[in-house]
Amino acid sequence: MIILFGLAGSGKGTQGKALSEIFGWRWLSVGEAIRETGDYEEIINKGGLIPDEDVIKLMNKQIEKAEAEGFDVILDGYPRDKAQAEYITENMADKIDGAIILDVPKEELYDRLALRGRDDDKEKASIDRRFEIFEQNICSILPLLEGKNIPIQHVDGVGKIEEVTGRLVEVVKEMNPNATEQTTDVNGGEIEKSYGE
């Protein structure tokens, strides 16, 4: 299991999907999982946060399903805060190969988010608030991972999408020596060639 962290616009979604294709793993995005339930639209539209216990339950179900089907997992955006990180480090530390942080300068992120065009990407103040929350959370998450001797690596997220993917592939192979590149599309779809979450 690999955990992908990064600010909004850093390319976690795009790169998570790419890695899932390359290694034949399952990409699990907390944002996508929450949106698919359709249960939290009102909270999301008001900029609120989904309760931790709901997120943990939802992601547990997704992880268990992937593992039951024989897939290793790439987690995108989970754990999102200290409570979620405490749960995952207490219950799944032995499954986690490592955590990767995609580093992209904020000025570039503003440009990427403007191009993405989602409603929650339009106001700089709103984006800055999301950045601030992420930075606060990552400061509480990383020590918990380090406490379980889970490797953490920063990867430069600037450049062509394929270049960033190449950097990530090398880091994943370091973290999980059993990771082997596949030749077929296991997720049945095209890799999105733009920067997502």
Image: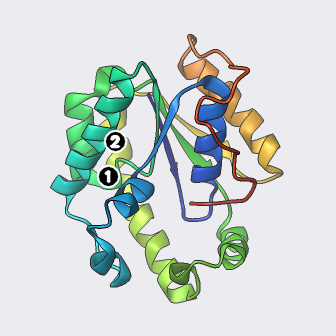
The x, y position of residue 74, in whole percent, is 49, 35
Q: What is the secondary structure assignment of the residue under circle 1? A: helix
Residue at 43%, 52% (x, y): give it.
77
User: Which part of the image, by quadrant, shows the N terminus?
Assistant: top left
Count of picture labels: 2
Query: What is the residue that sits farthest to the front in this orientation?
Result: 188
Query: What is the residue that sits farthest to the top in this orientation?
Result: 178
Q: In this view, does 28 lie to the left or right of 155?
A: left
Q: How crowded is mark 2: few (under 14 residues within 10 Å), some or many (20 or more)?
A: some
Q: How crowded is mark 1: few (under 14 residues within 10 Å), some or many (20 or more)?
A: some
Residue with the mark numbered 1: 140
Residue at 58%, 42% (x, y): give it.
16
Residue at 67%, 30% (x, y): give it.
185
The x, y position of residue 84, in whole percent, is 25, 48
**In the rendering, which numbered label is found on residue 60?**
none
Q: Splitting the image into 4 quarters, where does residue 136 fall?
A: bottom left
Residue with the mark numbered 2: 143
Q: In this view, does 50 lie to the left or right of 99?
A: left
| Disc 1/disc 2 C-alpha distance (Å) | 6 Å
Q: Which of 143 and 116 is in front in this view?
A: 116
Please name the amino acid that badge 2 sits on: Pro
Residue at 46%, 24% (x, y): give it.
72
Disc 1 + disc 2, Cβ < 8 Å: yes
Query: What is the residue that sits farthest to the left in this orientation?
Result: 53
User: Which part of the image, by quadrant, shows the C terminus?
Assistant: bottom right
Please name the amino acid that badge 1 sits on: Ser
Position above or below: 146 against 34: above
